[in-house]
Amino acid sequence: MSTREKLYEGKAKVVYAGDHADELILHFKDDTSAFDGEKLAQLARKGEVNNAFNAFIMEYLQEAGVPTHFLRRSGAQESVVQRLEMIPVECVIRNRAAGSLCRRLGIEEGRVLEPPVLEFFLKNDALHDPLINRSHIRSFAWATAEEVEAMTRWTERVNVLLVDLFARAGLILVDFKLEFGRFQGDLRLGDEFSPDGCRLWDAQSLEKMDKDRFRRDLGGVVEAYLEVARRIGVPLAS
Ligand code: TMP
Ligand code: ASP
């Protein structure tokens, strides 16, 4: 395994070539980052927790009919996925106001958004992931009109599925980010779903149980991820 080819290293994952040309290995690092990589730290067990969390969610979505790149977990911090041609657009859906939406529009945190707000951001840390719209995506050919429609539809479908999953565990799914890519021309959900890329609040106390604990120096980051994992039934030693 040590001779495998490293293709890309991101802030939270390393991507290696898989055993087959159309597969990749994702290695979930203990590194965590925020504010486009300005704030960095290492958190013990984060890679293992996010790998198990992501596998659970991807399998859940796949069983519900969402096309994803996920194939199988291959180690404590690793999973095998299909090699996608990634679309450089982050699809964010919001059920409650938080984060950049509050800063941008002066909305109070926690306001219920009905219908949920869907936003696109360009995946570009140097430009701080700017907000973009369908017109930008089309004009710069980041995706086709059909792909934009499909990304919108799948993001809304994933939202319905996961709002329900987390609600049953006493958690509010505030918002989350998805990334999509193409596999043999077909759109699929790629990247990961973990508490690094979503906001989750305890339904009773409204306590933050996601990466905002790291962004805001609240402490107990991995402990909160483990608690969320335990509540939804991700198999992990606590
Ligand atoms: P935001 O409030 O910072 O725009 O983020 C909205 C949600 O999307 C939040 O759950 C974090 C997630 N997100 C990422 O995981 N990575 C990103 O680069 C961005 C822009 C958002
Ligand atoms: N994931 C991004 C970063 O590391 C944005 C964030 O989560 O704040 O900078």
Image (tube, rainbow, N blue to C red):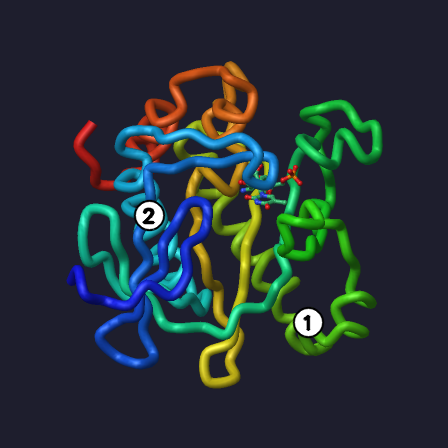
The spot of residue 5 in percent (x, y) is 28, 68
Look at the numbered disc 1 and say if its residue's Cβ is closer than 8 Å to ligand 1: no
As drawn, is 13 to the left or to the right of 88? left
Q: Which of marks 1 and 2 is nearer the N terminus?
A: 2
Residue ID at (34%, 79%): 22
In the image, ligand 2 is in what quadrant? top right
Residue under label 2, please give it. 28
The spot of residue 87 in percent (x, y) is 59, 68
Please state, as top left, top right, bottom left or bottom right, where the C terminus lies in the image: top left
- Compare residues 77 and 192 and report the one nearer the observer: 77
As drawn, is 77 to the left or to the right of 136? left
Residue ID at (25%, 79%): 20
Residue under label 1, please give it. 142
Q: Measure the C-alpha gap from mark 1 to mark 2.
A: 26 Å
Please state, as top left, top right, bottom left or bottom right, where the N terminus lies in the image: bottom left
The spot of residue 43 in percent (x, y) is 34, 29
- Compare residues 55 and 171 and report the one nearer the observer: 55
Mark 1 vs 2: CB contact within 8 A: no
- Of the residues shown, which amino acid type is indicated by label 1? Trp
